[in-house]
Amino acid sequence: MNREAAWALVEEQIANANLRKHVLAVEAVMRKLADHFGEDAEKWGLAGLLHDIDYDETAKDPERHSMIGADLLAELG
């Protein structure tokens, strides 16, 4: 998945504007960390951008947080 597709998914799945700002901030931090550790900044950035992709769906059931997102991303390839 490229960044454009990931952002489209964020817009589709995350309604809260503050949460969108949060995932953008995490994306930026993850890219900097990847650079620092000599890792793939694109992959790390996407991980940061998508880490809360299921938050709206799992807000009332935090034990499912990340599992639903992982399933969604697996379905998308």
Image (tube, helix red, strand yellow):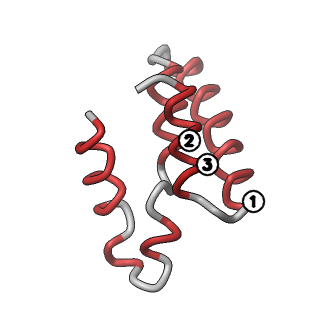
Horizontal side of residue 52 vs 23, given as left or right: left
Nearer to us: label 1 or label 3: 3
Residue 24, quarter of the rendered image:
top right
Type of amino acid at the residue the image marks with label 3: Glu
Query: Disc 3 marks which residue?
Result: 11
Type of amino acid at the residue the image marks with label 1: Ala
- Inter-mark Cα distance, 2 to 3: 11 Å
Q: With respect to residue 40, does 20 lie above or below?
A: below
Horizontal side of residue 17 vs 56, given as left or right: right
In the rendered structure, find residue 9 and report the number of the disc placed on it: none
Horizontal side of residue 67 vs 17, given as left or right: left
Whole-percent x, y for residue 13 in the image: 52, 56
Q: Earlier in the sequence, mark 1 or mark 3?
A: 3
Query: Disc 1 marks which residue?
Result: 17
Q: Where's the C terminus, which quadrant?
A: top left
Residue 14, quarter of the rendered image:
bottom right
- Inter-mark Cα distance, 1 to 3: 9 Å
Whole-percent x, y for residue 48 in the image: 53, 41
Whole-percent x, y for residue 8 in the image: 56, 39
Name the secondary structure under disc 3: helix
Whole-percent x, y for residue 19 in the image: 67, 60
Q: Earlier in the sequence, mark 2 or mark 3?
A: 3
Nearer to us: label 2 or label 3: 3
**Are dots 1 and 3 in contact, CB under 8 Å?**
no
Few, some or many residues within 10 Å of mark 3 (<14, 14–19, 20+) = some
Q: Residue at x 45, y 17 (%)?
A: 40
Query: Disc 2 marks which residue?
Result: 49
Name the secondary structure under disc 2: helix
Type of amino acid at the residue the image marks with label 2: Leu
